[in-house]
Amino acid sequence: MNVFNDLTAYNKYLNLAEPLHPLMDSRVCKQAIPNFPPSSNEIQVNLYKISLKKNFTGDIKYGKASYKTDNGLMLLSEPGQVVSWDALTFWDGYAFVFHPDLIKKHSVATKITQYKYFSYEINDALFMTAEEEQTITWLFTKIHYELVDNKNKTNEDIILSLLNVILTYADLYYKRQFSETESHQTSVSSKVKMLLQRHYNDLSKPVANLPSVSSIARELHLSPNYLTDLVRTETGKSTIQLIHDYILEQAEILLLQTNLNVSDIAYQLGFENVPYFSKLFKKNKGFSPTEIRNQGNG
């Protein structure tokens, strides 16, 4: 797999000109896309990338998830993302790519570590309203022309300030998207519970393993971070808390309705480490498994 750690090598792979700045580059998509290789095996890009895509109809694959849409969307990816594409078609918009060194001495670096959406996958894309798209387009345009018009005397502070505004808006827009998802669709927390019910549909025999945030996210075609942000918006809890709550409810049922010992119950539910199960149970329920059983027999 090809790995790209700098803009010059990455641009060369995409058949693009030298970057407009050693640490950052801006592209108008409808001008850049015709140069791209029509298809690509997986590549790893160790750069930050923010894209505004309009009229996007191609297939793109991040990791094992693919996505297709005709709507305007915004994608933000962190260094280390693996991407491939096949039969790429045209779209409008902008792409701003930058090296991690660009932001190391700027407050933007702290903000990026706080925003989880850089680790979202393409199927967690930000869908913007017309007004939101207009705002983001203006900001991308300002960055692009700042780089093009002042190629030799680029003011990094201006561009980083514009980047900061884009990130702040992206956070705000994602919160709106979470809210709309909660209001107009089956809640994601309900979907998580349904998957857990399916996993533990027969408590009379052991399950193969413990469900994880990653396995649940994969079932729902979401990235783990995006799933957790949705769950937290709906319930105030993390996905792992939701999973633990459900599993330990099943544990309590087994403690009160069967004669299985604590070790057997732990293994039945997928735990390999019995002390960890007991510790987690007490933290969640306020009592140890043995204390719960004794209360039931009291």
Image (tube, rainbow, N blue to C red):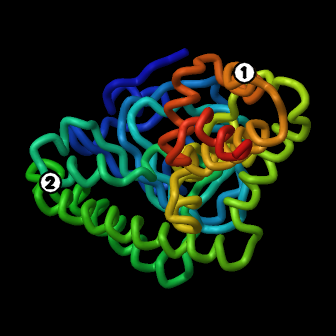
Secondary structure at badge 2 equals loop
- Measured in 3D between alpha carbons, the distance from the residue under mark 2 to the one under mark 1, in whole angstroms, is 47 Å
Numbered tag placed on residue 156 in the rendering: none
Q: Nearer the viewer, residue 97 or 111?
A: 111
**Residue 148 as seen in the image, left or right of residue 11:** left
Q: Position of residue 157 (x, y in %)?
A: 11, 58
**Residue 122 as seen in the image, left or right of residue 232:** right
Numbered tag placed on residue 267 in the rendering: 1
Residue 33 visible in image: no
Secondary structure at badge 1 equals helix
- Contact? badges 2 and 1 (CB < 8 Å): no
* Vertical order, 178 against 293 (above or below): below
Q: Nearer the viewer, residue 196 or 99?
A: 196
Residue at image point 58% right, 68% down = 234
* Vertical order, 210 against 144 (above or below): above
Closer mark to the observer between disc 2 and disc 1: 1
Residue at image point 34% right, 24% down = 5
Q: Which amino acid does label 2 sit on?
A: Ser
Which residue in the structure is indicated by mark 2?
107
Q: How crowded is mark 2: few (under 14 residues within 10 Å), some or many (20 or more)?
A: few
Q: Position of residue 93 (x, y in %)?
A: 50, 62
* Vertical order, 88 against 174 (above or below): above
Q: What residue type is labelled 1?
A: Tyr
**Residue 45 as seen in the image, left or right of residue 274:** left
Residue 79 visible in image: yes
* Vertical order, 221 against 183 (above or below): above
Q: Where is residue 286 in the image (x, y as percent from the top left)?
A: 50, 47
- Specify the farthest residue to the bottom: 131
Q: Quadrant of residue 253?
A: top right
